[in-house]
Image (spheres, grey):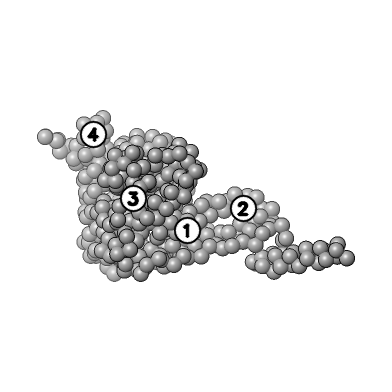
Amino acid sequence: MATSSAVTANYVLKPPPFALDALEPHMSKQTLEFHWGKHHRAYVDNLKKQVLGTELEGKPLEHIIHSTYNNGELLPAFNNAAQAWNHEFFWESMKPGGGGKPTGELLALLERDFTSYEKFYEEFNAAAATQFGAGWAWLAYANDKLKVVKTPNAVNPLVLGSFPLLTIDVWEHAYYLDFQNRRPDYIKTFMTNLVSWEAVSARLEAAKAASSSSS
Amino acid sequence: MTTTVIIIIFLAIFATSLHNARGATMEPCLESMKTASLPDLPYAYDALEPAISEEIMRLHHQKHHQTYVTQYNKALNSLRSAMADGDHSSVVKLQSLIKFNGGGHVNHAIFWKNLAPIHEGGGKPPHDPLSSAIDAHFGSLEGLIQKMNAEGAAVQGSGWVWFGLDRELKRLVVETTANQDPLVTKGSHLVPLIGIDVWEHAYYPQYKNARAEYLKNIWTVINWKYASDVFEKHTRDLDIN
């Protein structure tokens, strides 16, 4: 069966922007091998199968996410589509030698909207720790304001009308091999050692540009 | 004289109930609350191998289930205070914590009884009347297992797959619930016979992403005797075949 490259090119399993062992000891190579190599890969592969021969085939990933979100009445392809997007966004939210406090305009905005970096950290940590079951915690941008959001399963801020800037995966598969049940330790390690504030800043610039061009 | 005795007895009972009430509240309107506690496993941590590893059983029981118990008791205490204060908005706000952690406790307490070591009957198929009822509703035991596995594999995120008895409609059902929602959230007349935890913590250290493999193997340690006992208890007064 012939499939055009345009179809498959939309849903690609991009490797993370670092080697699978590059986040050690904070996130193990074994975790990345399974999380990217099995879980993320399965979302991409299953999405391709799911949209083949339907009107969604060949559509950009974000289009599929929006239409299958269907105002909360999720259609079958939503889970795979959103999870494919979320995981790529997650890898790009991290870097070796990351974490700690941001600087510059991003820090200024965090201080403006949360009163301090510490308050932002508290809120982000609480969101990640209290999301029941599977889901994600996010820093997002909407209406010229930064906010923390937590979402269940595959839901992301795109479908809630805001620009995602940073995410942490709190599905158990994201941390179980390294932290077992200790989700709070995983969140702390992520914030202290893994967050790529450069990526967050770049996304913020893009979000501001997109906001002003549409207003 | 008799009236005095009655009053003294009443006061003694009243004082005892105050003494038994946990916490510092002296609200006689609230009954003393029995908090939840972690039940012991009815078998050793390694007794379900190779289907479920000792590592998983330890983490699952001593960490996950224990945390549900601890958080549930904490929420109950907060609820007691909110009720005592007439703080209705807090009472309502606490419901999701109670449902999640209480559900986690209830579900896992059933789950440990749903499992048994092979040498204690784990995996041994059910006898009548449950066996005939399964055949009538699912064609065969294999048919039921296949349906459970398909629905369990399809749960997105965290949840449970249940084999249950619908007391009202007098039939057997397969249902799934999200997160720690107990089976009754799908219908108050539903009685759980077998529940299988498909949260990733239930299988990840051993099976990683291969949930289907976990589901396939768990049937070797499913305690059909427990399911039969519950089924018989609830169908004694029903006319079910």
Which residue in the protein does label 4 denote? A57
Binning the other alpha carbons within 10 Å of mark 2 as few (below 14), some (14 to 19) or many (20 upward) gives: some
Q: Mark 4 — on which chain does it sit? A: A
| Disc 4 and disc 2 on one polypeptide chain | no
Q: Earlier in the sequence, mark 3 or mark 2?
A: 2
Which residue in the protein does label 3 denote? B127
Q: Secondary structure at mark 1?
A: helix
Q: Note whether residue B233 is visible.
A: yes
The label nearer to you, 3 versus 1, is 3
Q: Amino acid at mark 4?
A: Glu
- At x 56%, y 63%, the residue is B35
Which residue in the protein does label 1 denote? B105
- Report the front residue among B66 and B156: B66
Q: Secondary structure at mark 3?
A: loop
- Report the front residue among A200 and B210: B210
The answer for how far apart the CA atoms under marks 3 and 2 are is: 48 Å
Q: Tell me: residue B79, above or below residue A66.
A: below
The label nearer to you, 3 versus 4, is 3
Q: Mark 2 — on which chain does it sit? A: B
